[in-house]
Image (cartoon, rainbow, N blue to C red):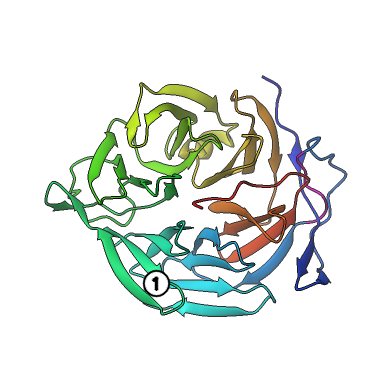
């Protein structure tokens, strides 16, 4: 496997027919990954947050993301205006929009919730497994049937762990909860391949990422090792955090070194570098060619040559 090349990038953000050219970090002479990107400079859109996570594009030019320690979900609208969507997020982490245009939220206080973003009303989707609360739901992905795969590691969870172990679950459209994976240390990021035939799970604390064949919604086959992260010394053993995928099935993993990019065969393609360590990411913008990255205290964006699929819808 070839070593990833270090990359950085530049961006033009297009909104309502106008182009915003923002100052950004130079590319430092690195070449982009052919056909993928980046297409310019990394842009810091907003900063001063506690710990950003869970970027989610609503398909209408708006981006939502969470600030975990401040218990907020923020909205960046299509014109670039930033606002607080809610300051009672129950330590929301991963976010994604479903087919109905509702915001599905992993709340680290122990439940999955659904927000109507128009009325700002919230309902609990599920709050436990076999009568016991979840540890601290972390990240999620929604399939075409409306079912939700989500991870439930130990971060911010009560001790001892309510579930006794860290797991991956599936919530069916009818609201039934199934435990799918229970043998990974701290399953964190989770994403489906564009054809929804593979579920990828990215554990923290180890360099090897996992992939599971999806036999039918909510039912997985035996897992396999998918790829091995490039590490930054012993600290790199923290593994991956959030993730996203593009229309060609390439995967983008938030790691200590930056966003590590792999193709669908698990071969390393490169590393997208950011001024702060990425936590999560998603494609958005009018053509879904803008990669939005939440990284510690800031929200970043970078234009790409490739686009992302329409997630959750």
Residue 255 visible? The answer is no
Specify the segment rendered in magenta: 36-41
Residue 264, magenta (yes or no): no
Instruction: Please identify the quadrant where the N terminus is shown.
Output: top right
Classify residue 230 by image quadrant. top right
- Please give left or right for residue 301 compared with residue 180 in the image: right
Q: Position of residue 226 (x, y in %)?
A: 51, 25
Q: Dot 1 corresponds to which residue?
A: 71
- Please give left or right for residue 153 compared with residue 27 in the image: left
Q: Residue at x 39, y 23 (%)?
A: 223
* Relative vertical location of residue 193 with respect to residue 19 in this rendering, above or below: above
Magenta region, main secondary structure:
loop
Q: Position of residue 272 (x, y in %)?
A: 70, 45
- Please give left or right for residue 141 compared with residue 127 in the image: right
Q: Secondary structure at mark 1?
A: loop
Residue 39, magenta (yes or no): yes
- Out of 196 and 68, give the one closest to the viewer: 196
* Relative vertical location of residue 76 with respect to residue 133 in this rendering, above or below: below
Q: Position of residue 43 (x, y in %)?
A: 74, 62
């Amino acid at each position: 496997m070839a070593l990833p090349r270090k990359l950085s990038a530049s961006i033009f953000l297009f909104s309502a027919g106008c182009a915003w050219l923002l100052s950004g970090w130079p590319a430092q002479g690195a070449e982009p990954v052919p056909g993928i990107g980046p297409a310019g400079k990394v842009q810091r859109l907003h900063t001063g947050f506690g710990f950003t996570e869970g970027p989610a594009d609503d398909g209408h030019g708006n981006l939502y993301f969470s600030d975990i320690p401040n218990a907020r979900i923020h909205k960046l609208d299509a014109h670039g205006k930033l606002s607080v969507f809610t300051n009672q997020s129950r330590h929301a982490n991963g976010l994604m929009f479903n087919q109905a245009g509702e915001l599905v939220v992993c709340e680290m206080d122990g439940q999955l919730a659904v927000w109507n973003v128009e009325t700002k009303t919230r309902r609990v989707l599920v709050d436990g497994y076999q009568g016991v609360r979840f540890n601290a739901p972390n990240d999620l992905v929604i399939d075409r049937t409306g079912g939700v795969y989500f991870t439930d590691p130990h971060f911010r969870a009560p001790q001892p762990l309510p579930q006794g172990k860290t797991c991956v679950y599936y919530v069916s459209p009818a609201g039934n909860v199934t435990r799918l994976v229970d043998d990974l240390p701290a399953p964190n990021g989770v994403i489906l391949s564009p054809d929804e035939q593979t579920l990828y799970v990215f554990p923290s604390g180890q360099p090897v990422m996992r992939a599971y064949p999806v036999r039918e919604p909510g039912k997985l086959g035996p897992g396999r090792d998918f790829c091995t992260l490039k590490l930054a010394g012993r600290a790199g053993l923290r593994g991956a955090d959030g993730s996203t995928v593009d229309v060609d099935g390439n995967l983008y993993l938030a790691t200590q070194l930056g966003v590590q990019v792999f193709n669908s065969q698990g071969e390393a393609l490169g590393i997208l570098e950011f001024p702060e360590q990425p936590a999560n990411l998603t494609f958005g913008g009018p053509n879904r060619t803008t990669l939005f990255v939440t990284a510690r205290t800031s929200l970043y964006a970078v234009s790409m040559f490739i686009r992302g699929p329409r997630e959750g819808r």
